[in-house]
Amino acid sequence: MKAKITSVLLALLLISGCSKPLPTDKLSYVGEWKSKQMGLLIAGDGNMAYKRLIQGGTKSVNGPIKSFEGDDFVVGVLFLETRFVVSEPPHEVNGSWQMVVDGVRLTKVGTTRTTTENNISDKKTVKRKASPSLMTVGWKAYKAGRYEEAIEKYTEHIDFHSVDEKSLYYRGLAYEKAGNNKAALDDFVAATQFEPTHIDSYLHIDYLLAKESKYGEIISHWDNYMSFDSSNGRAYLERGGAYFRSGQKALALDDAQQACDLGENKGCQLIRKYSR
């Protein structure tokens, strides 16, 4: 239920929100910031994604940065707002960039861009570095098996251009091929927060979680997908498989029937298996 509520709020933010590029004096905030319990992704176009582990659960916030108040920033639209308290703004420490948000020290992921960030003088500079061709270069590197290079290019695109489901999804693919399943899973989940019906991301989430037998989490993700699109037979087919592997055969049979009714031949074949 909480996952569905979060996704509904996210959808409202994405529909209602209108991001604007970060102010020139706040460009040091751009990038992917992480600690063990928190992840923060801020794009130059003003969009951000946040996830934090809290007492066994997670809190997520996604949307446009509405304003900066000193070093703090406010995310959201209309009455849906979240303030992030920045007690230490971005600064360099021994060659890496750090900042403290809501009491948590975060480190910027990827190559330090000290020289670039110090010399950006206007938004046109950012747009030049934000060339959409980075996505193309990243894809060519991925197809050639140069996964670390692909990750670097997709991250550069996210940092200086925009964060969306496509850039996160393709970086997730590169992380997966590079053997970093945790980072891949994070990117695929983030992609579904930007586009709740991005089914390719859900399929990879399913695959990665199944490797760890986390069928309850798989079911929750497919529940989230179907709260936005209940007409995709593949979604029922995959959720049914998770139900079956977790021992919930009656629910697996229901999903196989739904998948069959929606034109998934494999669902029709699985009805007999799940009926045994």
Image (cartoon, rainbow, N blue to C red):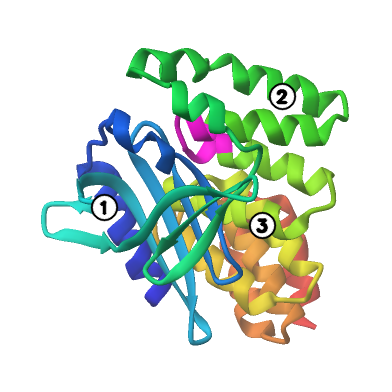
Quadrant of image for the N terminus: bottom left
Q: Which residue is mark 2?
A: 139
**Going 37% across and 13% down the picture, which residue do you hit?**
124
Prevailing secondary structure of the magenta residues: helix
Q: Quadrant of residue 127?
A: top left
41 magenta-colored: no
Q: Could you tell me the amino acid type at mark 1?
A: Phe
**Going 21% across and 51% down the picture, which residue do you hit?**
70
Q: Quadrant of residue 19?
A: top left
Give the residues in magenta. Answer: 158-167
Return the mark for residue 185.
3
The x and y percentages for residue 225 are 48, 58
Q: Could you tell me the amino acid type at mark 2?
A: Trp
- CB contact under 8 Å: marks 2 and 1: no
Of mark 2 and mark 3, the one earlier in the sequence is 2
**Residue 232 visible (yes or no):** yes
Quadrant of image for the C terminus: bottom right
How many angstroms separate mark 2 from mark 3 (CA)?
Answer: 19 Å
How many angstroms separate mark 3 from mark 1 (CA)?
Answer: 27 Å
**Does 237 sit left or right of 79 as displayed?**
right
Q: Which residue is mark 1?
A: 73
Q: Is residue 65 above or below residue 37?
A: above
Q: Could you tell me the amino acid type at mark 3?
A: Leu
Q: Is residue 122 above or below residue 56?
A: above
- CB contact under 8 Å: marks 2 and 3: no
The x and y percentages for residue 213 are 77, 76
The x and y percentages for residue 236 are 59, 62
**Mark 2 secondary-structure assignment:** helix
